[in-house]
Amino acid sequence: MKLLILTQYFPPEVGAPQNRLFELAIRLQKSGVDITVLTAMPNYPQMEIYEAYKNKKYVYGEMEGLKIHRSSIYVSKSKAIVNRLRNYFSFVISSARIGNKQLGDFDFLLCESPPLFLGYTAMFLAKRKKAKLIFNVSDLWPESAEKLGVVTNAQLLKLAYNLEAKLYKRSVLVTGQTQGICSNINQRFPEVKTYWLPNGVDLNYYNPEKIAATNWRQLNDFTDNDFIFLYAGIIGIAQGLEIILHAAKNVEAQSQVKFVLMGSGPEKPRLITLKEELGLTNLIFLEPVSKKEMPGILKNCNAGIIPLRKLDLFLGAIPSKLFENLAMQVPVLLGVDGEARELFITKGKTGIYFEPENVDALTDAITELIQNPSLAIELGANGRKFVYDYFNREIIAKQFYDRLLKL
């Protein structure tokens, strides 16, 4: 079986889709699938082409046996919609050209969305390479872009919705990262075959018993007695991270409580300014780190905070950062209602839920956890067991391989 993965995002970039696709590819490869990846020159999240790839139109390499073809992409630090579209469509064009020229035939082509517009390349290459198209939806685009106010142009939205419908209908299978995504697609397109392909975690890699102690706390001026709340991920519009800063202000009298926002993204400059305006001394911003460093950092933290804005759109969302936290026995304060709350709070008992965008609710959850150290330990233990039972990458990949055999 030969599978082509088409994605704008892939390691050595750091991020949720990068890790998810790489981990799935490695495990499918172990099952005997011949994997090729067609992706962009690495640039995310800094939006700057990595030094080794600058000024190159095409690069081929291998990564743990995976064949990786990289094509050019336009990048800009500007948040303007014009520059964002140039970013998307530059890779649409370059990936179609490189894929057509450099690649042979495949049994399947798995396209990662967003960006939705990469679907143009997927349909073109699927036809040219005689491959069955599988469209993987990790975020309902353009619905999310419209509801977040990222895209407001009516013509562009109409174009995107038409493309979305065409892609679903041309795919032999549409995979969704959450059950909510699959349900949404099935309600709008009852004839489309969907499959829940969840994110997961490598429980051998994220294993608190195997991670040695580090001096991360000391390097960042924390003491052994500090109770550290961590947010690690994209600092974007969807997350609504200002809630963490306002909650930090509410508990600043408790000197042992500290907050870390680790990552980069379009909202980071605004939040740094907000920190200065609030005069916060119990919260720091840190740059994103490599996957290799994350287990050690998580082992040094007492709890994770995972918020999203209060939108119906996110009732079917499952933030990927949940899995690493729980695998490392780090309890979570979860500000995401719907599917994530039902799975990880009601069913898994892995943390405390707080109403999205409700500062007082987050403050109460923080207070409850720091006043009950035994609760934090119990929730952390529940978390590792829950992801072991339901979000183990080995099982997810094996089940997906079995599904491919039936197509």
Image: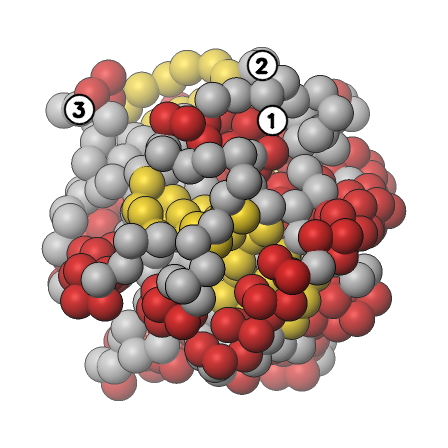
Instruction: Determine which residue is flagged by label 2.
Output: 65
Q: Is residue 82 visible?
A: yes
Residue 109 against residue 279 in the figure, above or below: above
| Residue 339 image position (x, y, % from top left) | 69, 72
Circle nearer the N terminus (3, 2) = 3
Element at label 2: loop
Q: Is residue 340 visible?
A: no
Residues under labels 1 and 3: Cα distance?
25 Å
| Residue 286 image position (x, y, % from top left) | 32, 41
Tag of residue 73: none
Q: Are marks 2 and 1 in contact (CB under 8 Å)?
A: yes
Instruction: Determine which residue is flagged by label 1.
Output: 35
Instruction: Determine which residue is flagged by label 3.
Output: 54
Q: Are marks 3 and 2 in contact (CB under 8 Å)?
A: no
Lateral position of residue 182 relative to residue 364, left or right: right
Toward the viewer: 161 or 250? Answer: 250
Amino acid type at circle 2 is: Gly
Circle nearer the N terminus (2, 1) = 1
Residues under labels 2 and 1: Cα distance?
9 Å
Toward the viewer: 366 or 393? Answer: 366
Toward the viewer: 407 or 310? Answer: 310
CA neighbours of label 3 inside 10 A, class few (<14), some (14 to 19), many (20+): few
Residue 404 against residue 308 in the figure, above or below: above
Amino acid type at circle 3 is: Lys
CA neighbours of label 1 inside 10 A, class few (<14), some (14 to 19), many (20+): many
Tell me the quadrant of the picture where the N terminus can be found.
Answer: top right
| Residue 26 image position (x, y, % from top left) | 65, 26
Lateral position of residue 337 relative to residue 358, left or right: right
